[in-house]
Image (cartoon, rainbow, N blue to C red):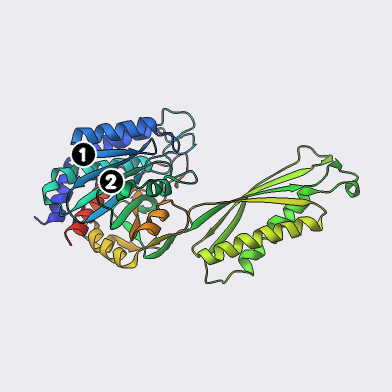
């Protein structure tokens, strides 16, 4: 029996325990940086397995397995979303308005399964594995950058490489998707406040209409994407909220917009921010209104290291079969794992979780999101195999 076959058999033996972990987390989701019960459960599991760990950021945990001069890190995010669950599962969320709609419950459970396998085979590890149970992925500034800045990853021995995975409802169970280079986008939050002066709707000449100005800001800024961006450079500007006025016969005195800017290219990201700020003000001034823009810088783009991605493909082929390791297109989603990819050579991949009986399923962040639990053992085996192969390469 080859090592991957033995690994998969060993992980399968604890599959029910991994599922139990997942359902515990799913029933008790907690929002970003408030994952107190989640952290307590994680630490109790590590205690039972006999794995040493350190606490960080109140709800974060970094565990250590093995010894030696080489080190690799595996990461799982632990926070949930402000979503009211509609799956109807027996183990649905017991916390009103909070749900693991992004699959982080799966991520934690898989890493705990990986931890148990690695601890049982610690004597075969040719180095150190650090397990990062990270809070606050869903909320800026994100837990990843704070974990890195805390210095905890440098304690003892610093990781040479960091790996992470995310459940992927677009792919069926049994597939793994990844790509080298830019894999997920940077993200910036945009908040506009357009100020005018209110008045009677029948006398618009006596008012300064912020609603009209804001509407033209929305349409005008689309030229940023269509005319001021190299078409070979991916970028997205989406205005996602428009709030102004409250009745039919009054021109309001204020309009508020919200949106997001996404890119893989840091230079274009900065240029786009400058363009948005300058042109929002110019457009507003055409209507004798004023515009205030607040840009909240979010996560950078996530870059998968090329040589390390090739290594991950070989690891994945041993677990999934080479025909099920798919070179996928990058996403304009954002992930704070991006900070790890800027810190050390890293790879992030997508784990198929769509039931094979379904052509499509509810997407991430949907109240009906319900991934197939048969993917849990595969994900745990993938993480364990990747750590072993890296340390014993």
Q: Secondary structure at mark 2?
A: strand
Left or right: residue 244 versus residue 387 is right
Quadrant of the image for the N terminus?
bottom left
Is residue 28 visible in this depiction of the protein? no
Give the residue pinned by disc 2: 131
> Which one is earlier in the sequence, the residue at label 1 or at label 2?
1
Q: As drawn, is 373 to the left or to the right of 228? A: left
Measured in 3D between alpha carbons, the distance from the residue under mark 1 to the one under mark 2, in whole angstroms, is: 10 Å
Q: Which residue does the numbered mark 1 point to in the structure image?
A: 51
| Nearer to the camera, 166 or 65 | 65
Identify the residue at image location x=14%, y=43%. Answer: 120
Tell me where residue 200 sits by quadrant. Answer: top right
Rendered-image quadrant of the C terminus: bottom left
Check contact, mark 1 vs mark 2: CB within 8 A. Answer: yes
Q: Position of residue 334 (x, y in %)?
A: 47, 53
Which numbered circle lies on residue 314? none
Front-most of 183 and 149? 149
Residue 195, x across and y down, in percent: 77, 47
Above/below status of 305 relative to 213: below
Horizontal side of 61 relative to 259 (left or right) equals left
The relative height of residue 72 versus residue 109 in the rendered view (above or below) is below
Instruction: Give the quadrant of residue 79.
Output: top left
- Residue positioned 73% across, 57% down in the render: 281
Q: Residue furthest left?
A: 1
Give the residue drawn at x 56%, y 71%: 231
Q: Is residue 208 above or below residue 309?
A: above
Is residue 191 placed above or below 231 in the rendered structure? Answer: above
Q: Secondary structure at mark 1?
A: loop
Asked if residue 123 shows in the view, the reply is yes
């Amino acid at each position: 029996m080859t090592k991957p076959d033995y690994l998969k058999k060993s992980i399968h033996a604890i599959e029910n325990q991994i599922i139990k972990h997942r359902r515990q987390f799913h029933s008790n989701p907690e929002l970003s940086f408030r994952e107190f019960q989640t952290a307590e459960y994680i630490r109790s599991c590590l205690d039972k397995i006999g794995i040493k760990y350190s606490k960080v950021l109140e709800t974060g945990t970094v565990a250590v397995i093995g010894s030696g001069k080489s080190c690799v890190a595996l990461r799982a995010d632990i926070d949930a979303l402000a979503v009211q669950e509609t799956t109807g599962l027996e183990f649905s969320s017991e916390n009103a308005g909070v749900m693991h709609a992004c699959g982080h419950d799966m991520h934690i459970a898989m890493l705990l399964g990986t931890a148990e396998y690695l601890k049982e085979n610690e004597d075969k590890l040719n180095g150190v594995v650090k397990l990062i149970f990270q809070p606050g992925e869903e909320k800026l500034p994100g837990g990843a950058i704070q974990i890195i800045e805390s210095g905890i990853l440098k304690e003892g021995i610093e990781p040479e490489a960091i790996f992470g995975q995310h459940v992927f409802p677009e792919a069926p169970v049994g597939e793994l998707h990844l790509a080298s280079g830019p894999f997920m986008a940077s993200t910036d939050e945009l908040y506009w406040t357009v100020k005018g002066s209110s008045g009677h709707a029948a006398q618009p000449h006596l008012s300064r209409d912020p609603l009209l100005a804001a509407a033209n800001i929305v349409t005008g800024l689309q030229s940023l994407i269509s005319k001021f961006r190299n078409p070979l450079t991916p970028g997205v500007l989406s205005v996602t909220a428009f709030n102004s006025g409250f009745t039919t016969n009054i021109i309001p005195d204020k309009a508020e917009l919200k949106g997001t800017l996404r890119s893989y290219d840091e230079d274009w990201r900065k240029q786009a921010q400058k363009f948005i700020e300058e042109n929002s003000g110019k457009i507003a001034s055409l209507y004798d209104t004023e515009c205030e823009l607040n840009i909240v810088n979010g996560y950078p783009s996530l870059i998968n290291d090329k040589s390390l991605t090739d290594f991950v493909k070989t690891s994945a082929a041993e677990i999934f079969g080479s025909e099920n390791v798919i070179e996928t297109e990058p996403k304009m989603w954002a992930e704070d794992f991006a900070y790890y990819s800027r810190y050390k050579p890293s790879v992030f991949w997508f784990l198929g979780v769509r039931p094979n009986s379904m052509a499509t399923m509810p997407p991430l962040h949907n109240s009906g999101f319900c991934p197939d639990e048969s993917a849990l053992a595969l994900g745990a085996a993938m993480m364990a195999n990747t750590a072993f192969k890296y340390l014993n390469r």
